[in-house]
Amino acid sequence: MKIARVKGTRDLLPADTLRFGAAEEAARRVFGSYGYGEIRTPELESTDLFTRSVGEATDIVHKEMYTFTDRGGRSLTLRPENTAGVVRAVVENRLDQGPMPLRLWYAGPQFRYERPQKGRYREFRQIGAELFGAPGPAADAEVLVMLFDFLEALGFRGLSVSLNAVPAGEGREAFSAALRAYAGGHAERLGEDDRRRLAENPLRLFDSKDPATAAILEGAPRAIDHLDAESRRHHAAVMELLRAAGIPFVEDPKLVRGLDYYTKTVFEVTSSNLGAQDAILGGGRYDGLVADLGGPPLPAVGFAIGEDRLVDVMPLAAAPAAGRVRVIPLAPDQEGYALSVARRLRRDAPVECDLSGRGVKKGLAAAAELGFDEAAIVGPDEARDGTVTMKNLKTREQKTVALAEIAR
Ligand code: HAM
């Protein structure tokens, strides 16, 4: 009996990992050039971490988490996102006491029990970055500028950011109350799930995928009208800085993002190439989260890119290594010598040994078909003389040379 992979998970095969690797290398290079260090946090965290940060009434916590009780009776969750884990790690490792601003990036798998479809998986990967200890609008702008440098490095052109700002504190409560009053007047048209949202946290109505709810929300109170004066100034300044930096953005008053921790700036980038018009990335400012998770008051802003979606629409072609050589032994007797030849040649190029035992004729045909540039043929003469016959698979030229000559 065959065992299939778990629904909503993927096997990333070498052709895929080449593209994922290229995206991660670009992240390491571009984010590194902005002063970001890489952090890796556990895939398994205490369930409380997510209920307290992402929020009880969000889709993620309400119905998408992989939560289980371990053998010691603890409630654990496979992380649905990485911001909460990074914040926990910052506080737990006292990075909040160290030099500021603190810049951290990450790449790794996340888990959400969603209905799988193209670009939506139950295990998916994110590349993200979080900037701590910088309260002003220039931090939001820097994060977005870095994001665009990264996207451009991968060949993306013509993308724009959807931008909004959400209120915190009293403004958020007033916005919530206004939304509740407004949507309460249309409660009979709301589905069961959206009635729950209305009761628990009316902001979450904006996450609804129900077209009836979307229609009702057309006339709803706007987040941006409930910002306090300082947040309004912050938002205006972010937009000014983005204009100055030449980052294209569109204001989207309906954008609130499906996680509870945001304050002020929220943003998303969508790609029309993604079929369902889904976001390739999302982020924003979360000035209250570090304190909420037991740390000091430390402002923060960041984003996460859905790596599976990014790689799907990424223009950059990830090329396999060039100059590859295939060592082909004439017969099993020369396989030992072939191994040592390959080892020597590897100082200059990626080298694979054809150990299939199919002999030189078939071996050469296979090497050419697989796109190798050169074959190193080793037979009894070569083994005896310490030589190798190098054949250029493109021009068919060949010559026998002493091994000591080609690889120094
Ligand atoms: P998020 O919007 O929940 O934000 O996720 C960010 C991105 O992850 C999405 O835009 C999408 O590309 C990708 N994603 C989410 N769910 C799936 C899925 N089921 N399959 C494939 N891709 C998916 C966050 O996670 C925040 N932690 C972002 C952030 C960082 N905010 C501040 N700092």
Image: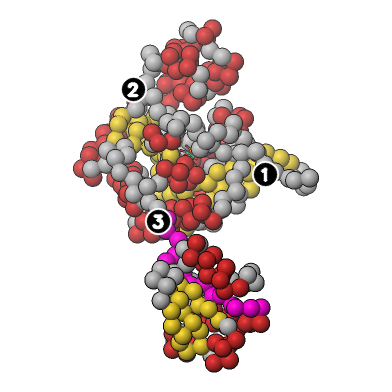
Looking at this view, name the residue that lies furthest to the front.
Answer: 361
Circle 2 crowding by C-alpha within 10 Å: few under 14, some 14–19, many from 20:
some
**Front in this rendered view, residue 80 or 200:** 80
Residue 323 magenta-drawn? yes
Query: Residue at 45% of width from left, 72% of height from top?
Result: 374
The amino acid sitting under disc 1 is: Arg
Q: Secondary structure at mark 1?
A: loop
Query: Residue at 43% of width from left, 14% of height from top?
Result: 215
Looking at this view, name the residue that lies furthest to the bottom.
Answer: 385
Residue 191 magenta-drawn? no
Circle 1 crowding by C-alpha within 10 Å: few under 14, some 14–19, many from 20:
few
Residue 125 sits above or below residue 171 on the image: below
Q: Secondary structure at mark 2?
A: helix
Q: CA distance from mark 1 to mark 2?
A: 47 Å
Q: Earlier in the sequence, mark 1 or mark 2?
A: 1
Q: CA distance from mark 2 to mark 3?
A: 38 Å
Q: Main secondary structure of the magenta part?
A: loop
The amino acid sitting under disc 3 is: Ala
The residue tagged 3 is 26
**Image location (x, y in percent) of residue 61:** 59, 33
Query: Residue at 56% of width from left, 53% of height from top?
Result: 13
Residue 199 visible in image: no
The residue tagged 1 is 5
Task: Judge depth for marks 1 and 3 and give the one in front.
Answer: 1
**Image location (x, y in percent) of residue 50:** 58, 39
In the rendered image, the quadrant that contains the N terminus is: top right
